[in-house]
Amino acid sequence: QVQLVESGGGLVQAGGSLRLSCAASGIIFTIDAMGWYRQAPGKQRELVATITRRGSINYADSVKGRFTISRDSGWNTVFLQMNSLKPDDTAVYYCNIKRYPVGDSWGQGTQVTVSS
């Protein structure tokens, strides 16, 4: 059974930085993409950043230039470096992996709170 364990969330002041990590285990079938999504109170879950095995990287417009997604060489861990954090970045951040033919798997989420 796949497990995605996130870490690195917390409370930070505006302008600060955090680094999220997500470790994947129990993987069957090749991971095609890894990424991060977030959900703020009262809002829908939204894409933050993704990285695919084909080499493409995508960011939400709201985080471009501030967040950086990366992964380890074994496709076991995905990271999200978050700089210049804003109060609007406050949300629960979820790790996501995509595998064919399984589809999406999600982590349990980690809270990021940015104070003004």
Image (cartoon, grey):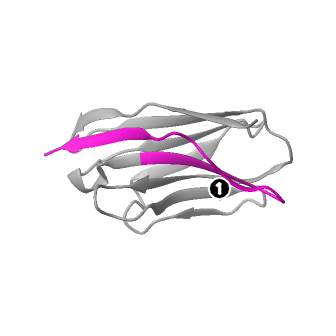
Tell me residue 2's x, y (percent). Answer: 73, 37
- Image height of 10 relative to 89, above or below: above
Tell me residue 18's x, y (percent). Answer: 38, 36
**Residue at the (51%, 39%) spot, across then down:** 108
**Residue at the (50%, 47%) spot, across then down:** 94
Tell me residue 1's x, y (percent). Answer: 76, 35
**Residue at the (60%, 50%) spot, across then down:** 96
Would residue 87 appear left or right of 29 to someone viewing this image? left
Element type at mark 1: strand
**Residue at the (32%, 55%) spot, across then down:** 40
Number of numbered markers: 1
The residue labelled by disc 1 is 51
74 or 113: nearer the eye? 113
Would residue 106 appear left or right of 84 to someone viewing this image? right
Segment tinted magenta in the rendering: 93-116
- Image height of 98 relative to 9, above or below: below
Tell me residue 29's x, y (percent). Answer: 86, 47
The secondary structure that dominates the magenta segment is strand
The answer to whether residue 77 is magenta is no
The answer to whether residue 100 is magenta is yes
Circle 1: residue type: Ile
- How packed mark 1 is, by other alpha carbons closer than 10 Å (few <14, some 14-19, many 20 or more), is many
Question: Hey, which quadrant is residue 65 in on the image?
Answer: bottom left
Kindly give the residue lying farthest to the bottom in the view shown: 61
- Image height of 3 relative to 35, above or below: above
Kindly give the residue lying farthest to the left in the view shown: 116
60 or 64: nearer the eye? 60
111 or 66: nearer the eye? 111
Would residue 71 appear left or right of 67 to someone viewing this image? right
